[in-house]
Amino acid sequence: MFTVPAQSSIHTPGYGICCEMLDCQRSLSAAACCIHFFPSASVPVIKKTWEKDALFLEYYSDQADPSIPTINLGVPNTERGHCGKTFAILQRFLSSAVPNTKWLLVVDDDTLISLPRLQILLSCYDPSEPVCLGERYGYGLSQGGYSYITGGGGMVFSREAVARLLNSGCKCYSNDAPDDMVLGMCLNALGLPVTHSSLFHQARPEDYARDLLAHQVPVSFHKHWNIDPIAVFNKWLKDDLTASTTDQPKKSAKTEL
């Protein structure tokens, strides 16, 4: 889990311009779900890329490993779907075991993400509202289905959204159920919106049209398959000088309001 502490967000009337980030890093928490049988392949990538930008980050697996460190949530790992583990992360986020922060980010262990850009994007949203943000997919929408945030690109929840989800009693039908889709069903039942951002990506940069990415300042990509993930992070997600690049993400965030 990775958390970023509280920061109010300001929407400038008539302009849709996001506020400047004031210690926003302290209001975000991050959670990385790790699979115990190949942590050596993914955890070092996180540590060499975006871990340094997280004020609070926890790695979860079914085995506690102090060398990483990972936390055993008491939920067994599954080959597909991670619903049981994700709901355990949501419960931990509201507990006294972790810092009280406004936002929760849940990612896969093979997600690449820019936390500084995410923090700028989050300044466009009010954490006191039930915000659920990421790349939105749909299931059976023409037949009364639901929208959901695809997990690979990263799922962001405000504390209010997590509280409403858990207070509703909505839960997994099995530990290996698809967590993102179950969460989508829960949000749909509660009447809570799923907010789409095109800056989150479920796949690798090479899986998208070059012209599409040319007009973005991306927040995330997903999967290490057949790529050098550190090189991808450095090319697409790393800002050498935060001060000189903050205007770009803010411009992209503005277009989504």
Image (cartoon, rainbow, N blue to C red):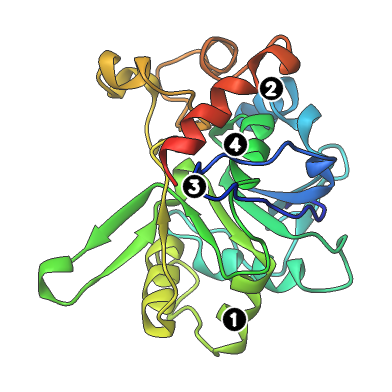
Query: Counting other residues with Cα less than 10 Å from the Cα at mark 3, is it few (<14), some (14-19), or many (20 or more)?
Result: few
Q: Amino acid at mark 1?
A: Arg
Residue wearing tag 1? 164
Residue wearing tag 2? 49
Q: Amino acid at mark 3?
A: Gly
Q: From the top left corner, tell me how far across and down residue 157 is, in percent.
A: 59, 60
Separation of marks 4 and 1 at Cα, in angstroms: 34 Å
**Depicted 222 relative to depicted 180: above or below:** above
Q: From the top left corner, tell me how far across and down residue 52 is, in percent.
A: 80, 28
Residue wearing tag 4? 38
**Depicted 96 relative to depicted 4: above or below:** below
**Among numbered discs 2 and 3, the one appearing first in the sequence:** 3
User: Which of 184/177 is in front?
Assistant: 184
Residue wearing tag 3? 14
**Depicted 109 relative to depicted 240: above or below:** below
In this rendering, the label closer to the viewer, 2 or 3: 3
**Among numbered discs 3 and 4, the one appearing first in the sequence:** 3
Q: Amino acid at mark 4?
A: Phe
Q: Is residue 229 left or right of residue 34?
A: left
